[in-house]
Amino acid sequence: MTAQFDLFAAAPTLPPGLAAADDILTAAEETALLARLAEVPVAPFKFQGWLGKRETASFGWRYDFDDASFGPTEAIPDYLLPLRARAAAFAAMPQDDLVQAMVTRYDPGAGIGWHRDRPVFEHVIGISLANAATLRLRRRSADGFERASLPLPPRSIYLLSGDVRHAWEHSIAAMEVPRWSITFRTLSYKGLSALARQSTGSGRPGG
Ligand SMILES: O=C(O)CCC(=O)C(=O)O
Ligand SMILES: [Fe+2]
């Protein structure tokens, strides 16, 4: 096969640990939820002193990128609990394990750069609202990056666990239309140990 043909090679299969489904909520439920989210006091995401363009609010647990502190915060609001129950059913996890809910608003021009989620968290479940986006995935290989992508239509859900969560990075390119997402996360062993250290008053917080 010529190099030219390689450009048209079949799309790579999705990385292990990635699961996705459409229509985790109805269009009417999405509209009602977006009306609630418009009231949530989101703040520009801070990363080591830089202000990101996306705006976030964390419930249940928060991780502060500025000082690496990590701890409990305002409880997950009631109106997110039915969605959390569906996210948990989708991921085959107890809903109480999804201890964090993060609301993110991406205005036009806002995206999220290449990253892995903080190690204090384990499983990551994302729900997309308002407009479609593409979750880009990459993993370093001997000669560059292995890449994959997952379309995120509004009302779809994805789960990152295992390989795709630990060995791959993900990002979302800035778009011209707004998008909201709700991310539910479980704590990792590291997160649970940090928590145990904090509650016994020894060791430093963080992750
Ligand atoms: O908006 C999304 O679905 C992705 C958010 C994300 O990757 C993160 O907050 O770590
Ligand atoms: Fe992420």
Image (tube, rainbow, N blue to C red):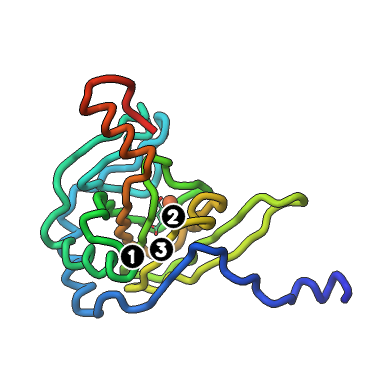
Q: Amino acid at mark 1?
A: Ile
The answer to whether 25 is drawn above or below residue 112 in the figure is: below
The residue at which mark 3 appears reads as 159
Q: Is residue 161 left or right of residue 88?
A: right
The answer to whether 1 is drawn above or below residue 183 in the figure is: below
Helix, strand or loop at mark 3: strand
Helix, strand or loop at mark 2: loop
Residue at horizontal 14%, vertical 47%?
A: 75
Identify the mark at residue 127; answer none if there is no mark: 1
Identify the mark at residue 109; answer none if there is no mark: 2
Q: Nearer the viewer, residue 173 or 192?
A: 192
Q: Residue furthest left?
A: 78
Residue at horizontal 25%, vertical 46%?
A: 58
Residue at horizontal 85%, vertical 70%?
A: 3
Residue 195: image quadrant is top left
State how far apart marks 3 and 2 are (Cα). 25 Å
Q: Amino acid at mark 3?
A: Leu
